[in-house]
Amino acid sequence: MSTLKKKGLPDNVIPWAKPYLGEKEKEYLIKAFSSTWISGGEFVDKFESDFSSIIGGKYTVTTSNGTTALHLALLAAGIGPGDEVIVPAFTFVAPANVTIQTGAKPVFVAIDPQTWCIDADEVRKAITPSTRAIIPVHVYGNVCEMDTLVRIAEDSGIYIIEDTAEAVFSKYRGRYAGSFGNLGCFSFQATKTITTGEGGAVVTDDEELHKQMRILRSHGMRENKRYWHDVVGYNYRLTNLQAALGCAQLANRDWLTGEKKRIYNRYFGNLSGIPGIHFQHIADYVEPVIWAVALKIDQDYFKGDRDFLITELLKRKIETRPGFYPFSMMPLYNAESNILVESIARNIISLPSYVTLSDETIDFICSQVKGLMK
């Protein structure tokens, strides 16, 4: 506690995440509120148009959250019972859950031990006549080997549905993540690099997929014939109020991404090269916008395991998070055990990464992590 006070840091817990909302967000939100168009409206249209222009896709369909974006993409692609969808064995559960919701089967594939993203060689081995799609997840802001994955998908005649929830504005060989697949899915949840509170989007160059998603997003109702329904649909729409926040965040994206890069570089400068601490490997041709700075620790170098670190750092008023539990550790998913994936997952700790985190606070966090080493 005394260290926190001496350095001028807050007495309360340093949170793992905190959204940045400025004057532009307030201005746009009030404008949307005053218009009385609080469901659909001009900010939804503007956000979709602006996001398409930035990411480089022809069409954007906004959704109520990142999970519904994934579900909408799978439905538009015609994924259903009897189909298989390849999903990384280490990721947040949304890609597997929405696959199950369509009636298809998730097929869990190992990750690269250095990048923590899906292993393209393992993807190739996992393809069967029932495989209809691959969902590469750009974990923590790193980007999967998209050149190889695109070739695999094209050779096999299957879809790529990118899960870009954690990697908005990350680039691979100069192109934005989410622009390589048939469909690119994004999340704007409160902890993400840009936020609408909740909210998501799907980007595609395919006009037919775009049309199908717009119908499915609004109860399956024809856009030119109100209350006429050709398919069973959903209410997955983004509100105008949320889109207003999103438009303001897009307008401020250079600053937001710049701060994300500053934070990652500060952590890397403090902790890289220390035995027992490992960052994700990021290829030279990837320009990441790291959503959450994560470390893989070697327990032999610390006074306890990863969960010990989480507990001890919280005592020091630093909130952290564990890595995602792999599907093989959760009985619900009936996934085969993978010792490599499980070892990586149980040793990952994610540190505070929000854009207003000061260099001084980052230095303090790093000092506390190093203080828990043997």
Image (tube, rainbow, N blue to C red):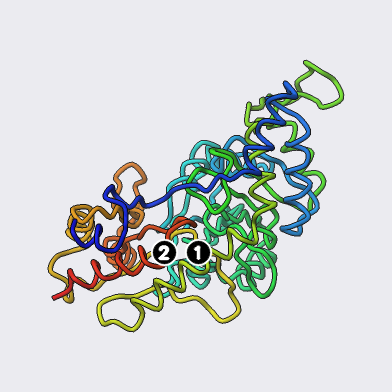
Q: Which percent across, then down, holds residue 52?
A: 76, 52
Task: Name the residue that disc number 2 marks.
Answer: 293
Q: How many numbered marks appear?
A: 2
Q: Is residue 265 visible?
A: yes
The image shows residue 330 at horizontal and vertical percentages of: 30, 47
**Residue 80 visible within the image:** no
Classify 193 as above or below 146: above
Q: Is residue 290 left or right of residue 328?
A: right
Query: Closest to the observer: 222 or 301?
Result: 301
Residue 130 position, x and y percent, is 57, 52
**Residue under the image location 43 percent in, 72 percent down:** 112
Q: Secondary structure at mark 2?
A: loop
The quadrant holding residue 162 is bottom right
Circle 1 sits in a helix, a strand or a loop, which is it?
loop
Q: Amino acid at mark 1?
A: Ile
- Res 222 → quadrant: top right
Question: Badge 1, how many Cα within 10 Å: few under 14, some, many 20+?
Answer: many
- The N terminus sits in image quarter: bottom left
Q: Which of the pair 152/24 is nearer the observer? A: 24
Q: Nearer the viewer, residue 3 or 94?
A: 3
Which percent across, then down, holds residue 111?
43, 67
Q: CA distance from mark 1 to mark 2?
A: 6 Å
The residue indicated by pointer 1 is 290
Q: Are marks 1 and 2 in contact (CB under 8 Å)?
A: yes
Quadrant in the picture for the C terminus: bottom left
